[in-house]
Image: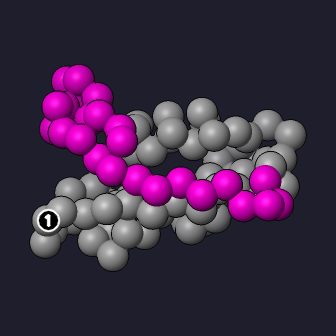
Amino acid sequence: MIRGPEKTPYAGGLFLFDVKIPPTYPIQPPLCHYYSYCDDRLNPNLYEDGKVCLSLLGTWSGHGVELWSPNDSNLLQLLVSIQGG
């Protein structure tokens, strides 16, 4: 569960995620599923069907430091990216 950051439209909101660490971690990024409890998208990166759209996860285009790197990326970076997204 991630709490929405203060001084944002998401402040005080609680966002529920399942994060699965695959056997290929850290070569491959974790798998992430968002549990939506509403009919509308609250955020452009979080879909009602559970998709988390981030370049760090490989579910959105990106380049350089935006992409998962087995040497530089980690679970904390992913969670901070979700919270800031």
Q: Residue at x 13, y 72 (%)?
A: 39
Query: Which percent across, then down, holds residue 73?
Result: 73, 40
In the rendered image, which quarter contains the N terminus? top left
- Could you say which quadrant of the image residue 33 lies in? bottom left
Name the image colouring: one colour
Q: Residue at x 50, y 34 (%)?
A: 80
Q: Amino acid at mark 1?
A: Cys
Q: Is residue 26 magenta?
A: no
- Could you say which quadrant of the image residue 42 lies in? bottom left
Q: Specify start and end residues of the magenta stretch as a single range.
A: 1-25
Residue situated in front as seen by the camera: 37 or 62:
37
What secondary structure characterizes most of the magenta part?
loop
Query: Which percent across, then down, holds residue 60?
Result: 55, 66
Residue situated in front as seen by the camera: 63 or 70:
70
Q: Is residue 81 above or below residue 38?
A: above
The residue singled out by tag 1 in the image is 38
